[in-house]
C-alpha cells in the first residue's frame, strides 16, 4: 500500500462552532478582512456570528462584500487592494465556493505582486495572509483544499490556483448556515460534492485513504437522494451533507478533479450554468465512459449509492436536475477543444480524447 496524504487545515465542525471557539481568532492577528458576498452571509447569520466573535475578542475587522459569483481576476485584485488599504493581519472567507475561493486569492495577492499570467502558475513566495474559512453551502469543500477557482477570460474558462500555500489554517463548519438554502442550490451543491468524491476516487491519484473518505462522502449524499428529490431535508440531513462536502474537499485536495470539472467549466463560462449542476449533467456520461474500460471501480461506486447500473444513476440525476439546457453541436465541439487542454484531464483513470469529450457532451444533453 502506498499513501501520500497532506491536510494542514485544522477542522472545527460543531453546532455553533464560531461562537464556541471564539478564542481561536486571537491566533491570527489583531485585524481581519472578512470576504463574502452581498447578501447570503447576512441572511443566514454567519456574518453576525463572526463579527460578534471578533468583537468579543477585541479583534478589528473590515468587510469586503463585493465577491461576484464565479469571481474574476479583477474581482480578487479589488479585494487584495482593499486588504492592503485596511492593513489586515488575516482573511476570513464566508460563503459558498465563490467567496471562499476569492478569499484564498485575496490572501495571496495581498502579499505577492503577481501578474495575471503568473497568478495560476507562480513562482510564488511563501508570503500569504492566514486564512480562516466558513462554508455556508454543502458542496465545494473549499474550506479544506489548496485550490482557488477563478474565471479566466483569456482561457474562456475557469482556472485554478493550486498550491499548498493557500490551504486554510482553520475551517469552521456549522450546518445551521445551510438551513435556509433554496432546494435548487442545495441540490446543485450536493451534486458538486458527489462529483468531487466520485472523480477523486476514480482518479489515477487516488489511494486507499482517499477511497475511504470518498466512499463515506458518496454514501452519505446518496442516502439523501430521495430527500433532495422530494424536498424533505431536516437538520440531520443538512449536517450529513455539509460533512460529506468537507470529505469531498479532502478527497480532491489529494487527487484533484478530472474530466467532469474540465468539461463543466465551459457550461458555466458560456451558459452561466451553476457549477454543481454542470458537473451533475456530465457525471453519468463520464461514468459510462469509464465503465467501458474500467468497470470494477465504477460498479463499486454505484454499489455504494445503492444503484444497479449507470442507467439508474442517470435516472436519479435527471430527477434531481430536471429539464436540461439546450446546447448546440457546434458548442459541444468548441467546449471539447477547450476541455482537452485542461490540466486535470491526464488524471482520469481512463484518459479521454477530445472526441470522447465531445461524445460525453452529446450523451449528457440527449
Image: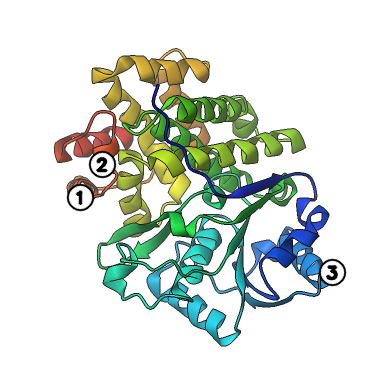
> What's the residue at 49%, 71% (across, down)?
106
Mark 1 Cα within 10 Å, few/some/many (few <14, many 20+)? few
> Dividing the image into 4 quarters, which one contains the N terminus?
top left
Front-lying residue, 147 or 307: 147
Which disc, if any, is residue 9?
none
The local secondary structure at tag 1 comes to loop
Residue 168 picture quarter: bottom right
Q: Are marks 3 and 2 in contact (CB under 8 Å)?
A: no
Q: Which mark is residue 345?
A: 2
- The quarter of the picture where residue 121 lies is bottom left
> Which picture quadrant has residue 234?
top right
Residue at 81 percent of width and 69 percent of height: 57
Please say if 1 is above or below 174.
above
Task: Residue under label 3, please give it.
Answer: 56
Q: Residue at x 79, y 61 (%)?
A: 23
Q: Position of residue 344 (x, y in %)?
A: 29, 44
Amino acid at each position: 500500500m502506498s499513501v501520500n496524504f497532506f491536510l494542514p487545515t485544522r477542522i472545527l465542525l460543531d453546532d455553533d462552532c464560531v461562537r464556541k471557539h471564539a478564542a481561536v481568532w486571537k491566533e491570527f492577528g489583531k485585524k481581519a478582512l472578512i470576504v463574502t458576498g452581498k447578501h447570503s452571509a447576512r441572511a443566514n447569520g454567519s456574518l453576525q456570528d463572526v463579527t460578534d466573535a471578533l468583537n468579543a475578542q477585541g479583534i478589528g475587522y473590515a468587510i469586503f462584500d463585493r465577491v461576484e459569483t464565479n469571481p474574476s481576476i479583477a474581482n480578487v485584485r479589488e479585494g487584495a487592494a482593499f486588504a492592503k488599504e485596511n492593513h489586515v493581519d488575516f482573511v476570513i472567507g464566508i460563503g459558498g465556493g465563490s467567496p471562499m475561493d476569492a478569499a484564498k486569492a485575496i490572501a495571496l495577492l495581498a502579499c505577492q505582486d503577481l501578474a495575471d499570467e503568473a497568478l495560476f502558475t507562480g513562482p510564488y513566495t511563501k508570503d500569504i495572509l492566514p486564512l480562516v474559512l466558513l462554508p455556508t453551502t454543502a458542496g465545494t469543500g473549499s474550506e479544506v483544499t489548496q485550490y482557488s477557482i477563478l474565471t479566466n477570460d483569456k482561457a474562456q474558462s475557469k482556472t485554478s490556483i493550486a498550491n499548498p500555500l493557500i490551504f486554510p489554517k482553520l475551517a469552521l463548519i456549522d450546518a445551521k448556515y445551510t438551513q435556509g438554502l433554496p432546494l435548487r442550490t442545495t441540490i446543485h451543491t450536493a451534486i458538486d460534492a458527489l462529483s468531487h468524491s466520485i472523480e477523486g476516487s476514480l482518479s489515477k491519484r487516488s489511494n486507499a485513504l482517499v477511497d475511504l473518505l470518498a466512499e463515506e462522502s458518496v454514501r452519505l449524499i446518496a442516502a439523501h437522494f430521495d430527500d433532495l428529490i422530494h424536498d424533505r431535508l431536516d437538520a440531520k440531513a443538512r449536517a450529513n451533507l455539509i460533512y460529506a462536502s468537507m470529505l469531498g474537499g479532502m478527497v480532491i485536495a489529494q487527487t484533484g478533479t478530472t474530466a467532469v470539472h474540465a468539461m463543466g467549466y465551459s457550461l458555466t463560462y458560456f451558459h452561466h450554468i451553476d457549477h454543481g449542476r454542470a458537473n451533475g449533467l456530465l457525471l453519468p456520461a463520464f461514468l459510462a465512459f469509464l465503465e467501458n474500460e474500467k468497470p470494477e471501480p465504477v460498479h463499486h461506486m454505484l454499489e455504494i449509492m445503492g444503484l444497479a447500473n449507470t442507467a439508474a444513476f442517470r435516472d436519479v440525476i435527471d430527477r434531481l436536475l430536471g429539464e436540461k439546457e439546450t446546447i448546440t453541436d457546434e458548442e459541444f465541439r468548441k467546449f471539447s477543444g477547450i476541455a482537452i487542454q485542461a490540466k486535470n484531464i491526464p488524471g482520469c483513470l481512463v484518459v479521454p480524447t477530445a472526441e470522447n469529450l465531445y461524445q460525453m457532451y452529446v450523451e449528457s444533453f440527449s
